[in-house]
Image: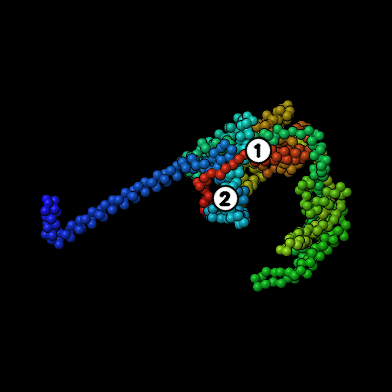
Amino acid sequence: MSASNKKKLRKEQEAEKLTEKQLSAQKEAKKTDRITYGFVALMAVILVTALIMGVSQLVRNSGVLERKTVALTVGEHEISNAELGYFYMDAVNTFTSQYGSYAAMFGLDTSKPLDEQVQNPETGETWADSFLTSARENAKDTYALVDAANEEGFTLTEDQLAEIDTTILNLEAYAKIYGYSDANRYIKAIYGSGATVDSYKAYVTHNTMASAYYDAHSESLTYTDEDIRAKDAEDPKAYSSYSYNTYYLSASNFLEGGTEDENGNKTYSDEEKQASVDAAKAAADSILEGKPTTVAELDACIAALPERENQSTASQAYADTLYSSVSSVYADWVTDEARKEGDVTVIANTSTTTNEDGTEETVTNGYYVVFYTGMSDNQFSLKNVRHILVPFQGGTQDAATGATTYSDEEKAAAKTSAEDILKEFESGDKTEDSFAALAKEKSTDPGSKDNGGLYENVYPGQMVTAFNDWCFDETRAAGDTGIVETEYGYHVMYFVGDADITYRDYLITNDLRTAEMEKWYTDLVDAMPMDLGDDRYIRKDLVVSAS
């Protein structure tokens, strides 16, 4: 037997001599070792996992992924998730701000995640998808304009740059108002963890550049008189305005009979529906039988009708309505060249639907009584005017509507200030330049103050009623002054004179410019390539309002 085998045998013999208690203790010790080693290994895994998760959370909170991951490429511009997030959130905010509580009418529940709500049942597109599509298109449009602006050497003005700086500076103020320690935290709260003040400023600058360049290009377009006359000749009535009164008799207001089910819902037979149409037509014809020659006589005929539920007792007036705004139901009659003041007629309001078998069905919904009062070819000059706004001070705000009302004393104080300004002007040389100087000093209207209160090419309906009526008073002459009260306060007025363009030519020029701008813009944007990227960090699960 070799030495090694002897050694092995001795160990085996010694092991046989161990007591049961010793063996048991030995087993427990080994078991403890295994548990200890396993626990240490498990804790090591947990610590590593926690470390990874902590670093991952730190990375997410830092916004690095949002800023480094390319969500979209337009042209040569790689747009990160953080930047696309600006376009995305602004698309969301624009929609919700525009429609407010009415967003629900479009199917948007602001208390639920956007990516859990289907916006288009046919395609399955969610609201998040819809807003993301808008964000992409807006980014493409913006960079198409920015690239064109840079290629042309277009730059922002000092005022535009100053406005951008003011916007950024205001972030600090808003941050404090809403309880954030600084502007960066405020921006992150709005646009996500990838947002920073610097990148937001770049975003604002790009949008300002795009908008300013678009406006500058539009203003650069000019048209000759030959261009204008050629466009006018295409459809002369398109640039005229029409005045008329209408009275509508809905067939539904003449429904009688009907069958009511157990839920209180009423249905009507075809015969009953036709009877209501006939009754509406008979009522409309009875107005014509009164042979009204004035609006007052028309309203008297309407008032003489037998009372019907939901029927008004007077006609609705449409004054100086542009051709494009005249209802298609009676536009042909109103704009007929043979039409003369006092003409009156009855016109059916019909709708056509397509049945399941493909056949079309025309239904008469009611009848319009239309009374013609006149037409304007809009061959009058636009107006140039200066003003100084003296706003009402104080006021009481209605908690429910948000509307502010002012006392007679508050209005009187504003009027006195306006009168004092006018007296100051009249005590001087009473020139346009001196009025402009006063406007720069005393007006509170942000739209005209820096330009000496000047509004050029004022067209009908552009300003509030009292302001508009003062400008377009037929007796108005250059150098006229006055004081006008509007909802904004008192306006000290100075009439500069007629503009060099008529309202008709202004409308034609706008149409020419709109058509040219649309083609220019479409061609510019269509030429900009766009490739989708990794947009996983866009806030598609956003809940607009948790309330």
Image height of 215 relative to 98, above or below:
above
Above or below: residue 258 compared with residue 358? below
Q: Amino acid at mark 1?
A: Leu
Q: Residue at x 67, y 36 (%)?
A: 215
Instruction: Identify the residue shown where x is 79% and y is 35%.
Output: 227
* Residue position marked by numbered label 1 in the rendering: 524
Residue with the most extreme top position: 429
Could you tell me residue 325's position as x and y percent?
76, 48
Horizontal side of 255 relative to 168 (left or right) equals: right
Can residue 471 be seen here? no
Q: Quadrant of residue 151?
A: top right
First in residue order: circle 1 vs circle 2: 2
Q: Nearer the viewer, mark 1 or mark 2?
A: 1
Q: Residues within 10 Å of mark 1 (few under 14, many from 20)?
A: some
At x 63% / y 33%, what residue is drawn? 149
Dot 2 amino acid type:
Asp
On the image, the x and y values in percent for residue 490 come to 69, 39
Q: Looking at the image, which is closer to me, 39 or 288? A: 39
Q: CA distance from mark 1 to mark 2?
A: 25 Å
Q: Position of residue 154 (x, y in %)?
A: 63, 30
Residue 21 vertical placement versus 182 (above, below) = below
Circle 2 crowding by C-alpha within 10 Å: few under 14, some 14–19, many from 20: some
Can the viewer see residue 148 in this picture?
yes
Image side of residue 99 versus residue 244, left or right: left
Q: Which residue is mark 2?
A: 129
Question: Measured along the vertical axis of the image, is residue 389 above or below residue 101?
Answer: above
The residue positioned 66% from the left and 45% from the top of the image is: 408
Q: Which label was assigned to residue 422?
A: none
For mark 1, give the secondary structure: helix
Residue 387 x/y as whole percent: 70, 35
Look at the numbered discs 1 and 2 and tell me whether their residues touch, using CB distance below 8 Å: no
Q: Nearer the viewer, residue 203 or 7?
A: 7
